[in-house]
Every structure is written in C-alpha cells, then in structure tokens.
Image (cartoon, rainbow, N blue to C red):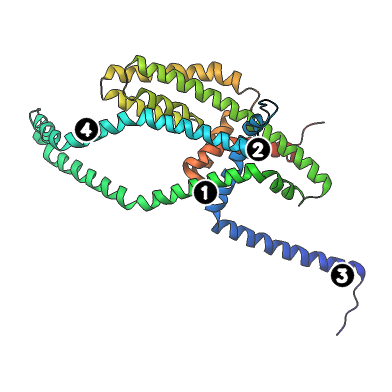
C-alpha cells in the first residue's frame, strides 16, 4: 500500500535515518578505538612530540650559511644527529663506571653473602630474627628476579619496537604533518575550520612555550645537581645529574624517582652524603617553586596546580610513564579547546 507523504514528513524521515546511521557509525568508531587503543596512543604521542619539536626544526631551517639554508628534511636529520651525539656522549662517559661496579658487585656477591650472614648471627637476638631464613628468602628473591627478567624480555622487546615506531611516526609527522593537518581541517565547514585552525595554532604556541620552559628547568636541575654530586663525591655524578635533568620532564614523578635513586647511591658510601643529596634537592625544589617556575612558566602553560595533578593522575592511569610524559601538554591543549568552545564569559 502506497502512502503519500508530505515533503516535511520525507525530510523528517531522512533526518531520522541520518541520525541512526550516524549513531551506528560513532559506535563502530568507538569499538575500533577500543581495540586499537595502543596504536592510537602511539600515533597521538608521535603527533604531539612532532608538534612540540617543529619550532626547533623551523629554527634550524632559518639558519643561513653563506646564502644556503637547510631544508626541513635536512633540519630533521641535523636534529636527530644532535640527539644521537648527546646520547652517545652520555653512554660513553656515564655508563662505564656503572657497568664496572656492577660487574665487580656481581663477582663479589656470592663471597660476601656468607660473611654478612655470619656477622648478623653475632648480633643480639639474631636467632629470633631468623637470619638464615632471611638469607634463604633473599637468595630465592634474587633467583625469582633473574627469572622474571628473562621471562619478561619479549615484553621489553615489544616496548622497544613501540618506541622505534613512535620515533619513525614522529619524523613523518614533522615531514608531512602539514598535509595531514590540512586534510583534518578540510573535514569541517569553512567558518568552523578557521576558528579551529586559530585555536589549534594557539594551543601549539602554548605547548611550544611549555617545551622551552621545561627544557630550561631541566637544564638548570641537571647542571646544578651534577655540580652538587661532584662536590659531594657521589658515585656516578655525571650519570645521576643527567638523569635528574632528563626525567624532570615528567612532573613530580620524575623528580621523586631520580632523587630517590641518587639518595640510595649516596647512602652506599655514607649517610652524610645521602643527607647532602636530600638537602640539596629540598633547597632546589623550594627555589624552583618559588623563583624559577613562576618566572619561566608564567607565559607558557598557565595551568593551575590542581589541573596538572589531575592530568598526571589520568595520564599515568591510562598509559603509565608515557601518559605522564604527555599529560601536561595534553592538559594545555584541552584547556585551550575548552576556553574557546565551552567557557561562557560574562558579557
């Protein structure tokens, strides 16, 4: 039976079918994103780091040597060479003392354990403490740890493959990111496209300023901690200072981990050295919060401390160390988008 419909009714049915198809499409995309969450995270991190590193690449392309300026591809190659040179210098200078001490420690450990156990037996109440039981459990723990490292080796190889994939994607985003960005903007109507483009460029400027400010803070911490460790005669001073500066890119968690590591290494020599390391970090963190951060970061991210803590918590829960690493620039991006599209100011 044919039913004659008015133009309004036909348009209404067309809109309903469109909404239904759109809903199913969104559901399918969400399911696909759920199954590809790891790959999407790698793509997002690569794109974010490419956006953060592009100002450095642009600065390199502006260098002029006798009328010649490097292209973007050459600038990226020069940036990679500089990073590889710094890493090679770090491994050549910082790691050999650590490897030498670890080799010596592993050689002397089987001989030292019985001596330590015998000394502990001479202590009062040693029998009640169960020294033999503790020693056997420690030996079992070391064996279990070695077995775990062997079993988890394929997982570490997988993580290494993910890191290499992210690096290659980051390079391609720096080379061809503008074309992908233009295609993304073409999915929006012209009016909304211009507004979104201005908003994203403002977010990119804020993230780039964050990178510069964070890099300056990393340099200050790395240099000051290295000098302090050398003055205190802490083992692996160069290596620990490098790690202090490098891991400072992860807010809060990076500093806590590195100062704990430095304190443990200093405690192997004396409690006085450990106290000196902790005192240095206590003075530095107060100086950073009171002086460096307000002046360096004033015009960069401009986020509340509560916002940064929530971003770190969510980023760590979603993607571990990687999530914590990109939490602050992601929070800056979200803050700019919310400020443009969600905030309703009083007129």
Q: Assign a secondary structure to mark 2.
A: helix
Q: Are marks 4 and 3 in contact (CB under 8 Å)?
A: no
Measure the alpha-carbon separation of dots 4 and 3.
83 Å
Q: Residues within 10 Å of mark 1 (few under 14, many from 20)?
A: some
Q: Examine the image and state in which quarter residue 304 appears.
A: top right
Q: Residues within 10 Å of mark 2 (few under 14, many from 20)?
A: some
Measure the alpha-carbon separation of dots 1 and 2.
21 Å
Query: Which badge, 4 or 3, comes first in the chain's sequence?
Result: 3
Query: Which badge, 1 or 2, comes first in the chain's sequence?
Result: 2
Query: Which badge, 4 or 1, comes first in the chain's sequence?
Result: 4
- Residue at 58 percent across and 25 percent down: it is 213
Measure the alpha-carbon separation of dots 3 and 1.
50 Å
Measure the alpha-carbon separation of dots 4 and 1.
36 Å
Measure the alpha-carbon separation of dots 4 and 2.
47 Å
According to the picture, the residue beneath numbered tag 4 turns out to be 104
According to the picture, the residue beneath numbered tag 1 turns out to be 165
| Above or below: residue 66 compared with residue 163 | above
- Frontmost of labels 4 and 2 is 2
Q: Are marks 1 and 2 in contact (CB under 8 Å)?
A: no
Query: Which badge, 3 or 1, comes first in the chain's sequence?
Result: 3
Looking at this view, name the residue that lies furthest to the bottom.
1
């Amino acid at each position: 039976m044919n039913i004659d419909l008015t133009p309004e009714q036909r348009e209404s049915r067309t809109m309903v079918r469109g909404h239904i198809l759109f809903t199913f499409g969104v559901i399918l995309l969400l399911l696909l994103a759920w199954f590809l969450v790891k790959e999407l995270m790698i793509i997002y991190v690569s794109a974010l780091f490419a956006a953060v590193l592009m100002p450095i690449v642009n600065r390199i392309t502006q260098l002029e040597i006798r009328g010649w300026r490097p292209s973007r591809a050459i600038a990226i190659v020069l940036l990679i060479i500089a990073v590889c040179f710094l890493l090679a210098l770090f491994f050549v200078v910082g790691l050999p003392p650590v490897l030498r001490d670890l080799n010596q420690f592993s050689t002397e450990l089987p001989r030292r354990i019985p001596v330590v156990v015998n000394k502990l037996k001479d202590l009062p109440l040693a029998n009640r403490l169960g020294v033999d039981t503790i020693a056997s459990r420690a030996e079992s723990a070391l064996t279990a740890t070695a077995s775990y490292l062997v079993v988890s080796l394929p997982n570490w190889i997988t993580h290494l493959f993910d890191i290499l994939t992210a690096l290659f994607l980051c390079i391609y985003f720096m080379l061809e990111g503008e074309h992908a960005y233009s295609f993304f903007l073409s999915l929006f109507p012209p009016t909304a496209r211009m507004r979104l483009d201005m908003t994203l460029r403002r977010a990119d400027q804020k993230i780039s300023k964050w990178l510069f400010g964070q890099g300056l803070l990393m340099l200050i911490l790395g240099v000051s901690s290295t000098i302090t460790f050398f003055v205190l005669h802490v083992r692996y001073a160069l290596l620990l200072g490098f790690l202090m500066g490098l891991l400072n890119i992860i807010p809060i968690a990076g500093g806590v981990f590195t100062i704990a590591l430095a304190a443990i290494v200093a405690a192997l020599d004396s409690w006085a050295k450990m106290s000196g390391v902790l005192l240095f970090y206590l003075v530095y963190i107060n100086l950073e919060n009171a002086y460096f951060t307000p002046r360096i970061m004033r015009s960069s991210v401009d986020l509340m401390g509560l916002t940064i803590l929530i971003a770190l918590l969510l980023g760590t829960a979603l993607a571990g160390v990687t999530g914590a690493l990109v939490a602050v620039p992601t929070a800056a991006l979200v803050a700019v988008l919310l400020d443009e599209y969600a905030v309703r100011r009083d007129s």
